[in-house]
């Protein structure tokens, strides 16, 4: 699993720039309400010249629930992961290592890198 560090910002920025140059995978996945990840996603997309309003997927919990379900992240990843370059997700939202591994393997299988913070 990947973990966040300051040098990860450069790595993610490089991923987004390479995707921009290649013409596909032009999005970033974050959890709605994660201010740090949302700000980072907006910053990275803007630096690559991409509109965050169209390229930043803010995933949230189902109505009436407080956290996003791991199964919902897996479902989103299997359906749409091929459109995204990176997902910036929180450890505390998905506390079980096996659930994080499933989410990560699904997204990576679709070509979307994962950064856990």
Image (spheres, rainbow, N blue to C red):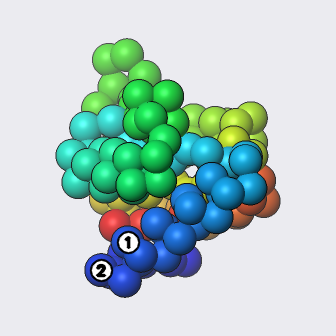
Quote the CA–CA distance across marks 2 and 1.
6 Å
Rendered image quadrant of residue 91:
bottom left
In this view, the residue farthest toward the right is: 109
Q: Looking at the image, which is closer to me, 111 or 26?
A: 26
Residue, disc 1: 9
Residue 18 seen in the current view = yes
**Vertical placement of 74 versus 114: above or below?**
above
> Could you tell me if the residues under marks 2 and 1 are in contact, i.e. CB atoms within 8 Å?
yes
- Height in image: 91 above or below 80? below
Q: Find residue 84 and report its horizontal and vertical position in percent.
A: 63, 47
Across and down, in percent, residue 95 comes to 39, 61
Describe the element under mark 2 as helix, strand or loop: helix
Identify whether 10 is placed above or below 83.
Answer: below
User: For this view, does 5 lie left or right of residue 51?
Assistant: left
The residue closer to the viewer here, 29 or 54, is 54
The structure residue drawn at horizontal position 73% and vertical position 46%, both measured from the top left corner, is 24
The answer to whether residue 59 is visible is no
Residue 14, given in percent of the width and then of the height, sits at: 53, 70
Q: Position of residue 62 (x, y in %)?
A: 43, 22
Query: Residue beneath label 2, please?
Result: 6
Query: Which quarter of the figure is the C terminus placed in?
Result: bottom left
Residue at 55 percent across and 77 percent down: it is 1
Residue 67: quadrant of the picture: top left
In the rendered view, would you say 90 is above or below 2?
above
């Amino acid at each position: 699993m990947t973990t966040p560090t300051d040098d990860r910002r450069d790595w993610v920025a490089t991923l987004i720039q390479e995707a921009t140059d290649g013409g596909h995978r032009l999005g970033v996945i974050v959890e709605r309400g994660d201010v740090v990840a949302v700000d980072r996603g907006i910053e990275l997309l803007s630096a690559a010249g991409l509109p965050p309003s169209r390229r930043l997927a803010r995933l949230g919990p189902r109505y009436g629930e407080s956290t996003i379900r791991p199964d919902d992240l897996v479902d989103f990843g299997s359906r749409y992961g091929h459109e995204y370059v990176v997902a910036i997700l929180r450890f505390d939202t998905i506390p079980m290592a096996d659930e994080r591994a499933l989410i990560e393997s699904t997204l990576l299988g679709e070509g979307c890198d994962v950064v856990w913070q």
